[in-house]
């Protein structure tokens, strides 16, 4: 396949390097002059995924007028529609646009390129770009890929993406997406508000409780949307993880202890992961909170239910982004107080 990677942040850089190293015909596009300059000088500098190395890749600042079999959308969610529109003229007639973003981006992209040419790729691994052109793989894992409604053969795309990690082809993309949305709405917003890596934050019981509350609200909204949730990475069962009414008021129970233990395990697995929303804010970019907690809030309103913790988390992320509020553990304590009202 001839592949175009749109965006060269953490995910885009790792994707480009892995595809290039395995001999695929891949071009990466970025609008960031600092990234382009660093990669031109030193290649893609890869850390945390085998031996540290530089990977020479084709990186451009203007989209080449060639036909691509697949466009891999690796921007942050707020930029995904602009990226899809920019790449549409070079997408082959039978090609696909692949959404690697968190959130529910596939319907947005489908409006641009058509449902039959839209594919979702739920990312079950982590990456960061600590400085321009330097990429750190922060967690192992692969993808679950699928389509919205249209059935199409994803075998060739699946084999290409296996350069990065194991690939599962799913016939329940919505279930995979909503389960990942629930986890991201928790860990990304809490990571942004707390200003620390996931492993450190989830050592605190009250942070784990906030995470459980956020995910529980997501599960309730998904049920209202008639989504059949799927396990995340084959292990995290959101239906089980959601708090029951009894657990919400209990001071302790075997099931509640088990759920806290699960979040501790998640924190350990992704202990080096840092919120991409926080990184976006630090770079002066728009945070993706409206694509995470905001999606939950908006869908809840459509169904006449309330999601106060997601609503408060979204408001606090925007306060950090727009009003200069500081990310800190104290800010998470404030969120916990607001959510308890």
Image: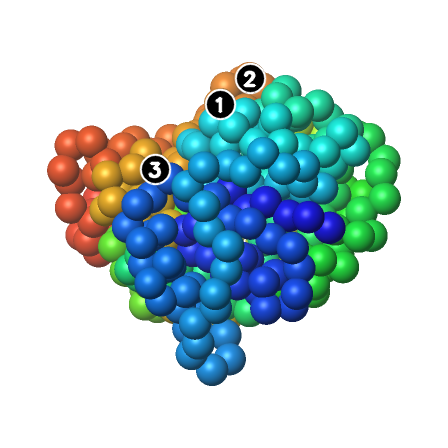
Where residue 263 appears, as percent x and y from the top left, is: 48, 63
Alpha carbons under labels 2 and 1: distance apart: 6 Å
Observer-nearest of 193 and 215? 193
Q: Secondary structure at mark 2?
A: helix
Q: Secondary structure at mark 1?
A: helix
Quadrant of the drawing holding the C terminus: top left
* Marker disc for residue 159: none
Q: Residue at x 15, y 40 (%)?
A: 325
Query: Looking at the image, can residue 117 be seen?
Result: yes
Q: Residue at x 63, y 20 (%)?
A: 111
Vertical order, 196 against 68 (above or below): below
Residue at numbered disc 3: 287
Q: Residues within 10 Å of mark 2 (few under 14, many from 20)?
A: few
Query: Looking at the image, can residue 96 be seen?
Result: no
Q: Number of callouts in the render?
A: 3
Observer-nearest of 82 and 287? 82
221 sits left or right of 281 in the view: right
Q: Residue at x 85, y 44 (%)?
A: 153
Observer-nearest of 217 and 154? 154
Vertical order, 193 against 291 (above or below): below
Residue at numbered disc 2: 302
């Amino acid at each position: 396949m001839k592949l175009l990677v749109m965006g060269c942040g953490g995910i885009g850089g790792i994707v480009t390097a892995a595809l290039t190293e395995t001999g695929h015909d891949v071009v990466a596009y970025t609008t960031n002059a600092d990234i382009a300059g660093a990669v031109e000088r030193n290649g893609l500098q890869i850390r945390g995924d085998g031996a540290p190395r530089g990977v020479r890749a084709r990186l451009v600042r203007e989209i080449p007028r060639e036909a691509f079999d697949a466009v891999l959308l690796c921007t942050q969610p707020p930029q995904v529609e602009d990226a899809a529109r920019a790449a549409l003229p070079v997408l082959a007639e039978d090609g696909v646009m692949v959404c690697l973003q968190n959130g529910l981006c596939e319907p947005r992209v489908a409006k641009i390129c058509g449902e039959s040419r839209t594919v979702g790729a739920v990312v079950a691994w982590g990456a960061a770009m600590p400085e321009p052109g330097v990429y750190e793989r922060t967690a192992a894992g692969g993808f679950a890929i699928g389509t919205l409604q249209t059935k199409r053969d994803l075998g060739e795309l699946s084999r290409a993406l296996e350069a990065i990690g194991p690939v599962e082809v799913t016939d329940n993309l919505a279930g995979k997406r909503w389960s990942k949305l629930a986890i991201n709405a928790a860990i990304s917003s809490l990571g942004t508000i707390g200003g620390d890596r996931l492993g450190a934050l989830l050592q605190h019981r009250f942070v784990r409780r906030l995470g459980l509350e956020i995910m529980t609200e997501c599960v309730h909204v998904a049920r209202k949307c008639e989504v059949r949730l799927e396990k995340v990475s084959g292990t995290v069962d959101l239906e089980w993880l959601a708090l029951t009414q009894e657990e919400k008021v209990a001071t302790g129970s075997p099931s509640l202890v088990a759920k806290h233990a699960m979040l501790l395990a998640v924190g350990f697995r992704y202990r080096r992961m840092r919120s991409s929303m926080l990184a976006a804010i630090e770079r002066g970019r728009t945070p993706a909170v409206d694509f995470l907690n905001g999606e939950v809030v908006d869908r809840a309103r459509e169904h006449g239910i309330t999601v106060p913790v997601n609503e408060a988390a979204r408001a606090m992320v925007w306060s950090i982004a727009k009003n200069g509020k500081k990310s800190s553990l104290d800010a998470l304590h404030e969120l916990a107080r607001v959510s308890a009202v």
